[in-house]
Amino acid sequence: MDKSGHYQWGDGVYTLLSWFRQDRVKQAHVLVAGAGALGNEVVKGLALFGVGRITVVDFDRIELSNLTRSVLFRERDALEHRYKAEVVAERAMEINPQISVTPIVGNLFSEVGFGLYRRADVVIGCLDSRLARYQLNQLCMRAGKTWIDGSIENLTGVVRVYTPGINCYECGLSRQEFNNIMLRTGCADVAHRQASAGRVATTPVSASIIGAMQVQEAMKVIHRDDKQPAPFKTLEGKMLRYEGMTCDVNTYRFASWKRNCPSHERWAEVRQCGNLTCSMTVGQALETLRGELNTTAVEINMRNNQFVDVIASDRPDREFRVMVPDSQLQHLIDTDRELRQLSYKTVFHKHFYENIDQDFPYQELTLRQVGVPPLDVLQVSTDRGLYYVELSGDAPLYNY
Ligand SMILES: [Zn+2]
């Protein structure tokens, strides 16, 4: 009970664990990327532990086939095609009404503000594609955060813990794996990128075993203390492999950290700017940045997204005004009847903006419309060098 006589989650239970620090757990923020089978198990575990703040990210909707291994989903959610992230958030707060779970429906790279990664104590990856892991790794390295990757297939599961300076997902990839990922990013033409992840067979049991281990490792990261030696071993720099068919559990050293890996770039010195929000127009934002950085010329580098104004088809030779961030282009083509039909017989070429400055022709669009999510960090070029500026005016949207 607290002073006012209310029951505090975990009172009389977690307080019996010598290492458990209720205050730390309550104040912790865990970002969970993916709300599928693993994401369900992970968020369930975090809610039961009483982790005070959880952000859950997924772009997908619930299907009937998800129900066999997703403890938080119900049949009516599938029939209503609800978003996974929203349902996971809602059900987790039913389990534990004392926590706050924020859903973000979208891509973890282009639609989650970098400020949320910066504010996370630990990130948990519940993803089903190499491309998504590659992107999440890059974001966590930029933010200097440990991330805990889980994967499951049939009765086998793997947990890997990546910590900047110790190991990196990209450094652990073979050349072939790396090339396969690159094939699906950065193409000048509109590629069919979302035809993602071949489906793998998974079971509810492997999801709960691996999801539970990810939560346990996350709790250890939350309890990490520079002053005292930890009372437990962690999977830092290691991977754990569970073979359900043979009941074998093995841990291996897994520390790949190469020099010159582009993913190791750390965005350490981020300036918080309370006057900036993603609902400002480009023109207002550029003006605010010039004042904030005390300079006459600034350029916003669109690192995770480009802004596409026009796409052109070969046959017939036509142009279409689309005005969307690159991350939304495929969806736009898929949902527009004319564009979708054309996409079967022609290649589209994009006209896009990678940098936004005073010559950008659409100054009246908001930052959000050109592809900057709330609480993101802008990479800004000036004549005095690069700056990283956070849209801190968006922080109240996430109760910060
Ligand atoms: Zn690396």
Image (cartoon, helix red, strand yellow):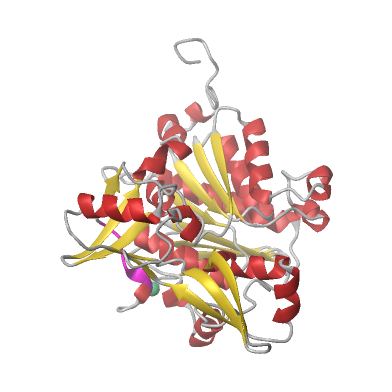
Above or below, comparing residue 168 to residue 4 in the picture: below
Please give the name of the residue rendered at 58% of the width and 56% of the height, measured from the top-left corner: 106
Residue 340 appears anywhere in the view:
yes
Residue 392 image-quadrant placement: top left
Magenta highlight range: 263-268
Residue 286 image-quadrant placement: bottom left
Residue 144 appears anywhere in the view:
no
Q: Residue 149 lies in magenta, yes or no?
A: no
Residue 382 vs residue 177: left or right? left
Front-most of residues 368 and 304: 368
The image shows residue 226 at horizontal and vertical percentages of 28, 46
Above or below, comparing residue 258 to residue 305 in the picture: below
For the C terminus, the quadrant is: top left
Front-most of residues 303 and 85: 303
Residue 158 image-quadrant placement: bottom right
Most frequent secondary structure within the magenta stretch: loop
Furthest residue to the top? 4
Front-most of residues 245 and 341: 341
Please give the name of the residue rendered at 55% of the width and 72% of the height, measured from the top-left corner: 131
Front-most of residues 249 and 93: 93
The image shows residue 213 at horizontal and vertical percentages of 57, 52
Please give the name of the residue rendered at 41% of the width and 69% of the height, measured from the top-left corner: 168
The image shows residue 51 at horizontal and vertical percentages of 51, 37
Q: Residue 264 lies in magenta, yes or no?
A: yes
Q: Which of the four quarters of the rendered structure image does ligand 1 lie in? A: bottom left
Residue 346 vs residue 161: left or right? right
